[in-house]
Amino acid sequence: MAARQFREQGYAAVSLRGIAAAAGLRAASLYNHFASKEDLVVAVLDDGIAAVLHAVDAAVADLPADVPFRTRLQAAVTAHLRSLLDRSDYTSANVRIFGQLPAAVRERNKAVRARYEGWWDEFLEAAQRRGDLRAEVDPALARLWLLGALNASLEWFRPERGPLEAVAESYTDLLCRGIEP
Amino acid sequence: MAARQFREQGYAAVSLRGIAAAAGLRAASLYNHFASKEDLVVAVLDDGIAAVLHAVDAAVADLPADVPFRTRLQAAVTAHLRSLLDRSDYTSANVRIFGQLPAAVRERNKAVRARYEGWWDEFLEAAQRRGDLRAEVDPALARLWLLGALNASLEWFRPERGPLEAVAESYTDLLCRGIEP
DNA sequence: GTCTATATGGGGATAGAC
DNA sequence: GTCTATCCCCATATAGAC
């Protein structure tokens, strides 16, 4: 519930009183669970990355070993979007508020984020070794390109306009083939 | 100066005292220029979009009429990144804080944002009519894909690591050709 | 158009009863 | 482990002198 408030209002605008109220508590009671507002938000941030990492890794691991790269990529993209747009308030809160946090807080989420970025780097580097990724493409830059575009969907996606799976498919196509004929 | 504070700290965390101090004023004096904090931030948001729209439009308009699509696209991408990463605190503030603003404030920036999105939609639709964009690609989705990826660079780009023009070139290549061989 | 002073409200955090 | 009560600070905004 705290995650949802952070996502919708931003870090500074959320009060411990409001978080406590949503949990049926008083603000002072939160201090039995977290030493400070910073500790609380770090827990939310870390959970958000853990959720998306687990979802993406599981989605790809569940595929047969011999499926084409494109299928594996689309599974990963779909899982990322599902975590961000549908499943996890923690993941969406992370994407929304990270850029606005005090440097000390961002620093504490860095190691967990790096693990997720590392998952994508390994995925793309392995693809490049197998020849599924063009040799001229820098995998780390492709990862920034890809995750940037995916995370931005948080700002415009509306489930009423169509299922996220359709976005995942179109985005995978754009990512693989580009816009040119 | 207010724009820089909004970008770095977020909307709620910025105080009128801080903005006034950076301008060599007292907080009360700001009310001779803006009726409220909301009015002030709306002015910053609108200026940010105006800056990037002007920069991108000028960059493309300055090219000879017969240059290839790819050249025009790279000029637009470069101009967008320059406004976001180098030139305009207003543009970067807009990208950073928009998602966290009260709905009433976002609403007031909507018309100006729509003009910029409209510029890209027309650019991409014209390209599709000329056959420079694949027929199966939805121009509006391509615009979301593209601007999402570009704006995300605000979170990772560091000028010490290399010029933004290099990012613009690589990103244009990824956008046009994708990652697959 | 700037200032000082202040009204009014809310924030994070702590003390100590139960 | 929750509560009430409170400390202390800072926020937006206004009043009125200069």
Image (cartoon, coloured by chain):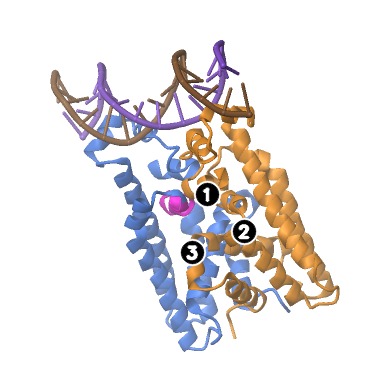
Chain colours: A blue, B orange, C brown, D purple
The amino acid on which the numbered mark 3 sits, given as a three-letter code, is Trp
The amino acid on which the numbered mark 2 sits, given as a three-letter code, is Arg
Dot 2, crowdedness within 10 Å: few (<14), some or many (≥20)? Answer: some
Q: Residue at x 46, y 57 (%)?
A: A83
Quadrant for the C terminus of chain B, please: bottom right
Q: Residue at x 68, y 44 (%)?
A: B110
According to the image, label 1 marks what residue? Answer: B7
According to the image, label 2 marks what residue? Answer: B87
Residue A176: percent from left, percent from top? 60, 77
Nearest the eye: B36 or A124: B36
Q: Is residue A96 magenta?
A: yes
According to the image, label 3 marks what residue? Answer: B156
In which chain is the residue bearing label 3? B
Nearest the eye: B17 or C5: C5
Task: Looking at the image, tell me whether mark 1 or mark 3 is earlier in sequence order.
Answer: 1
Quadrant for the N terminus of chain B, please: top right
Q: Which residues are magenta?
A: A87-99
Asked if labels 3 and 2 share a chain, the reply is yes
A20 up-or-down from A85: above or below: above
Magenta stretch secondary structure, dominant: helix
